[in-house]
Amino acid sequence: MAPGLKPIINDPKRSTELSSITGKMNSAIRATRSSDATQLKAQIGVYVAPDPIKFSINPPINNRFTDKSHMGLKHPFLARMLCPVDYLKQFDEDQVNICNNLKSGKHLMTAEDLPAFLWSRE
C-alpha cells in the first residue's frame, strides 16, 4: 500500500479526501486500459493468424482503415476465436445463429468464459 494513503484510510474524517484520491486513481487506471486496448486493436490483423506463412485470414483484415465494423463477431475467423468455448461446437454448425445470439445477449459472453483463442489446439 502507498505509505501516504494509510493515514487517510484510517481516518474517517478524511473520507472525502480518500474518495477524491481513489477517483483520480480509477481514472488513471481506465485511461491506461483504454490506451493499451487502443494500441492492441490496431495490430490485430498482424498477429491474428496462427501461422501467417502457412495460413492467411479470409477475408483479410485491413488495419489501414479506422472503421473496424468488419472485426469481432462480424468477421468469421475472429468470431470463432472470440466465441466462448462452451458454444464452439454450435458455432461450427451454425455460425450465423450463434453470432446473433452472442450479439443479442441470448448467449452471454463474459471474461470468465475464456474465449476459444485462449485454448491451445481446439
Image (cartoon, grey):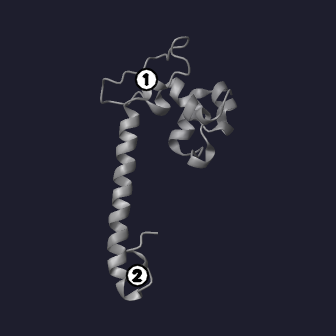
Crowd around label 2: few <14 · some 14–19 · many ≥20 (10 Å): few
Residue bearing the label numbered 1: 46
Crowd around label 1: few <14 · some 14–19 · many ≥20 (10 Å): few
The quadrant in which residue 36 appears is top left
- Which residue, as the protein is rendered here, is positioned at the far front? 3
Which of these two is toward me, 62 or 119?
119
Residue at 36 percent of width and 37 percent of height: 39
Circle 1/circle 2 CB separation < 8 Å = no
Residue bearing the label numbered 2: 7
Residue at 65 percent of width and 34 percent of height: 119
- The C terminus appears in which quarter of the rendering? top right
Which of these two is toward me, 104 or 82?
82
Which of these two is toward me, 40 or 6?
6
Which of these two is toward me, 94 or 11?
11
- Which residue, as the protein is rendered here, is positioned at the far top? 54
Q: Position of residue 64 (x, y in %)?
A: 31, 23
Residue at 68 percent of width and 39 percent of height: 86
Q: Position of residue 67 (x, y in %)?
A: 32, 30
- Which residue, as the protein is rendered here, is positioned at the far bottom? 13
The quadrant in which residue 9 appears is bottom left
